[in-house]
Amino acid sequence: MLSLLIGIGGCFILDGLINLTVAQPTHEIAGKFIPGVILVGIGLALIYGFDMWWPLILVIAGVVILLSLLFRRRAS
């Protein structure tokens, strides 16, 4: 189960990196990195015994998403 989380998260991150190297990357690159980082973070936290820390990872990721949306709207 844990290696599955890390593997799927790695696939999301790899897809985002491949999309970055394309001549015309889409604006949805963050949408590929965020789930990947969340899944890899949860998988690593569970492997290394940070069972109580994985909710904090989700909260931090949510705050980062909200802040990025807030700054994106101000820039527009």
Image (spheres, rainbow, N blue to C red):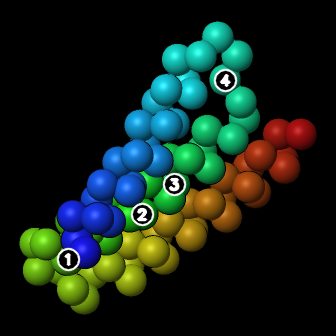
Q: Which image quarter is the N terminus in? A: bottom left
Q: What residue type is labelled 3?
A: Ile
Secondary structure beneath dot 1 equals helix
Q: Report, in whole angstroms, how far the alpha carbon at label 1 lies from the one at label 2.
A: 12 Å
Residue at the image point whose x is 61% and y is 38% from the top: 29
Q: Any mark on residue 25, and which? A: 4
The answer to whether residue 24 of the structure is visible from this angle is yes
Nearest the camera: 19 or 76? Answer: 19
Residue 28 on image: x %, y %: 69, 41
Q: Are marks 3 and 2 in contact (CB under 8 Å)?
A: yes
The mark that comes first in sequence, 1 or 4, is: 4
The mark that comes first in sequence, 1 or 2, is: 2
Q: In this view, does 55 lie to the left or right of 72?
A: left
The residue carrying mark 3 is: 34
Secondary structure beneath dot 3 equals helix
Q: Report, in whole angstroms, how far the alpha carbon at label 1 lies from the one at label 4.
A: 33 Å
